[in-house]
Image: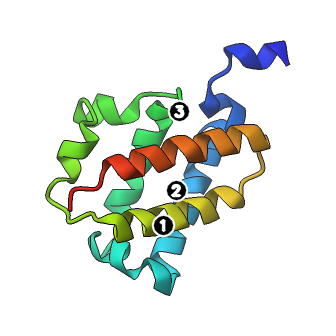
């Protein structure tokens, strides 16, 4: 267990391959779940750009390569999301998709719970309506 103390969440969850899988599953749910229709409407018709940005953001946020910062600068998440109407409904739908996607990943349950709690707080912070 001591060896895990110096490892980042990115490493503990499986690195790039797992983060890519998480993002793919997340957007699959967003694109197909009727109960995610409001949050899906906030996105462009093609989800390719959103997938790329979320992967790059999560990579750095989880302690892996800081790809988002390298390409776009500081995330300034709240500021970057101001152009989009995000209310409690969109936030809850975003978390529904993230919960379902995370539920499909094989990882330590405590790590998964901690990540979901942090993502939940992050999603709440994006509410601007």
State yes or no: discs 1 and 2 in contact (Cβ < 8 Å).
yes
Distance from Cα at disc 1 to Cα at disc 2:
6 Å
Which type of secondary structure does the marked residue at label 2 adopt? helix
Q: Earlier in the sequence, mark 2 or mark 3?
A: 2
Q: Are marks 1 and 3 in contact (CB under 8 Å)?
A: no
Q: Helix, strand or loop at disc 1?
A: helix
Q: Residues within 10 Å of mark 1 (few under 14, many from 20)?
A: many
Label ID, residue 95:
none
Q: Considering only vertical position in the picture, is 123 above or below 65?
A: below
Q: How many marks?
A: 3
Sooner in the amino-acid sequence: mark 1 or mark 3: 1
**Position of residue 117 measured from the top left corner of the image (x, y, whole percent):** 56, 44
Residue found at x 78% / y 50%:
106
Q: Position of residue 91 (x, y in %)?
A: 39, 62
Going by the picture, which residue comes out furthest to the left? 83
Foreground pick, 124 / 27? 124
Horizontal side of residue 17 vs 34, given as left or right: right
Residue highlighted by disc 1: 27
The residue pinned by badge 3 equals 62
In this figure, which residue is indicated by the disc labeled 2? Answer: 23
Q: Secondary structure at mark 3?
A: loop
């Amino acid at each position: 267990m001591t060896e895990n103390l110096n490892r980042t969440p990115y490493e503990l969850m499986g690195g790039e391959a797992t983060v890519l899988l998480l993002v793919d599953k997340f957007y699959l749910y967003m694109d197909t779940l009727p109960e995610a229709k409001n949050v899906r409407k906030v996105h462009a018709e093609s989800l390719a750009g959103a997938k790329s940005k979320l992967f790059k953001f999560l990579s750095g946020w989880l302690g892996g390569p800081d790809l988002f910062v390298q390409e776009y600068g500081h995330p300034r998440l709240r500021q970057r999301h101001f152009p989009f109407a995000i209310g409690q409904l969109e936030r809850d739908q975003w978390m529904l998709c993230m919960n379902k996607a995370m539920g499909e990943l094989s990882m330590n349950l405590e790590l998964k719970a901690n990540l979901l709690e942090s993502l939940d707080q992050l999603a709440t912070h994006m509410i601007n309506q």
